[in-house]
Amino acid sequence: MFLIIGHRGASGYEPENTLLSFRKALDQNADMIEMDIFKCKTGELVVIHDSTVDRTTNGKGKIQDLTFNELRALDAGKGEKIPALDEVLNMLNGKVKINLELKGEDTAQPVCDLIREHVNERRWKYNDFYISSFNHRLLQKFISFIPKNAAINICPLIYGIPIDLAELKTTLNAYSINISADFNDPDIIEEAHTHGMKVFVYVVNTAEEALKLQSLGIDGVFTDYPDRLQNLL
Ligand code: G3P
Ligand code: MG
């Protein structure tokens, strides 16, 4: 199955990483929804892409220096608030696969704890979760907190072409590698598959490019416009 992954929701249509954007991605039948995770000053996990609020809200400052209440007072676009990860998980409640991209250094344990809570109390299953990061050591840390036999999928992000892909399989037991469209080298795709890893490509916003990548054998794409790719693949 070729996966259509809503990048920051359906961020081509609605403000990125907001409930509005995630609802839109769901309406557009995305198979998976991607979002970026930081921890704020008071410890809550929040969904936002940058380490500061400057670009995506009407506020200023670093996430780690702002309390949850301060963050919630900001406008993240169209009157939307910066979501808490907890409320996103409550809203989506197992209806779609979810890709949590760990951005903040201190997110590994609290994300793992929150997932466990939602799997125990709501409709989520461990294998609905796909955890990614450009920081592979953070993924290693994350793995150390996963409960035994919980089949959470680990998806290292790569910008560039690493020498050793096999190492990602052995050290992280990676489910996939998530690579940039700037480096969709056919050899790396084949090598990842040889080692039993899927290949997802970010960010692909035209049907033409998605079809081309599909013909190279990749397993899915991150897109800002999930509806554009729906009927073509
Ligand atoms: O996971 C794909 C993509 O989200 C990685 O880059 O900067 O959009 O978080 P970025
Ligand atoms: Mg991301």
Image (spheres, rainbow, N blue to C red):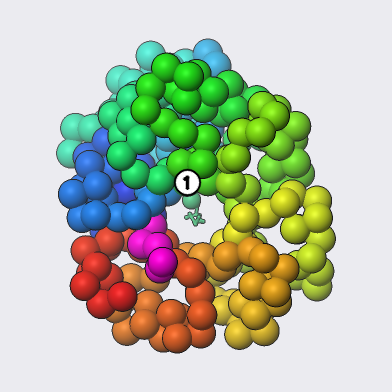
Q: Is mark 1 within 8 Å of ligand 1?
A: yes
Rate crowding at label 1 as few (under 14), some (14 to 19) or many (20 or more) other CA atoms within 10 Å: many
Residue marked by disc 1:
99
Residue 135 at x, y percent in the picture: 69, 48
Q: Is residue 61 visible?
A: no
Magenta region includes residue 39: no
The three-letter amino acid code for the residue at tag 1 is: Asn
In this rendered view, identify the residue nearer to me: 124 or 19. Answer: 124
The quadrant in which the N terminus is found is bottom left
The quadrant in which the C terminus is found is bottom left
Q: Secondary structure at mark 1?
A: strand
Which quadrant would residue 72 be assigned to in this image?
top left
Which quadrant would residue 232 be assigned to in this image?
bottom left
Q: Residue at x 80, y 72 (%)?
A: 163
Q: Is residue 228 left or right of residue 204?
A: left
Q: Total label count?
A: 1
Which quadrant would residue 192 be assigned to in this image?
bottom right
Residue 184 at x, y percent in the picture: 56, 79
Stretch of the chain drawn in magenta: 1-6
Q: Residue at x 31, y 34 (%)?
A: 92
Q: Is residue 84 above or below residue 127?
A: above
Q: Residue at x 22, y 42 (%)?
A: 23
State the predominant SS element of the stretch in magenta: strand
Residue 158 at x, y percent in the picture: 64, 62
Judged from this view, the residue extending furthest toward the front is 149
Q: Is residue 130 visible?
A: yes
Residue 122 at x, y percent in the picture: 38, 22
